[in-house]
Amino acid sequence: MTPVPAYRLRPMHADDLPRVLDLERRLFPADSWSTSMFRDELRADGRYYQVAEIVDPEPDQPAVIGYAGLRYVPPEGDVQTIAVHERWWGSGVGTALLTALLTEAERLAVTDVFLDVRSDNPRAQRLYQWFGFTEIGVRRGYYRDGVDSVVMRRQQASVGAVDNDRGED
């Protein structure tokens, strides 16, 4: 695997939307969020969105390589979205983004975090299981292309105990 360029996590801003939407459409062609959906999320109360960006991108590298969002109404929260550019799969970017969401959830006294993940995405399911998410149900035909959603829940524990050397994304 090629060495991962230095990246940082920071809050998502409206200025990031063109790059985020490019990645969104590339990774989720059947279920892409629209510009207005992202704008509404960024304006709404009870939201926490982060982007992963390359510190000094080369001309052929995307500046934004990942993003993630959390909706929270303590004591519950939902991972709304999480995505990592396929060039950086397995590099720890997804682990870093999910850690940021769960750390913020813990800070906000969110005790139960939920998410939906495609039933045909075992890579993401493994990442979530590694973070302590367990399957609690299935939504049949949830996605636009008819794929089921696996509903998962994590009851908050200390996020600091996570060993980041074991994450896949």
Image: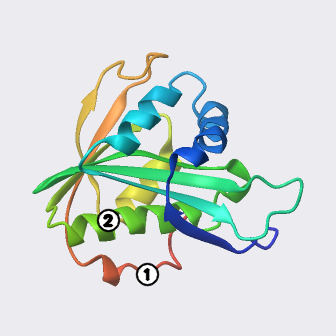
Rendering coords of residue 12 (x, y %): 50, 54
What residue do we see at 42% from left, 62% from top?
98
Rendering coords of residue 113 (x, y %): 23, 54
User: What residue does disc 2 label?
Assistant: 102
Is 86 situated above or below 11? above
Q: Secondary structure at mark 2?
A: helix
Labels 1 and 2 touching (C-beta < 8 A): no
What residue do we see at 52% from left, 45% from top?
14
Sequence-earlier tag: 1 or 2: 2
Q: Could you tell whether 157 is left or right of 142 in the image?
A: left
Rendering coords of residue 32 (x, y %): 53, 27
Rendering coords of residue 67 (x, y %): 53, 52
Residue 163 numbered tag: 1
Q: CA distance from mark 1 to mark 2?
A: 14 Å
Q: Could you tell whether 22 is left or right of 95 in the image?
A: right
- Point out the frontmost of discs 1 and 2: 2
Q: Could you tell whether 42 is left or right of 134 in the image?
A: right
Mark 2 belongs to which amino acid? Answer: Leu
Residue furthest to the left in view is 75
Residue furthest to the right in view is 59
- Tell me, yes or no, if residue 129 can be seen here: yes
Mark 1 belongs to which amino acid? Answer: Asp
Q: Secondary structure at mark 1?
A: loop
Quick one: 40 or 162, which is closer to the camera?
Answer: 40
Density class for disc 2 (Cα within 10 Å; few <14, some 14-19, many ≥20) is many
- Quarter of the C terminus within the rendering: bottom right
- Quarter of the N terminus within the rendering: bottom right
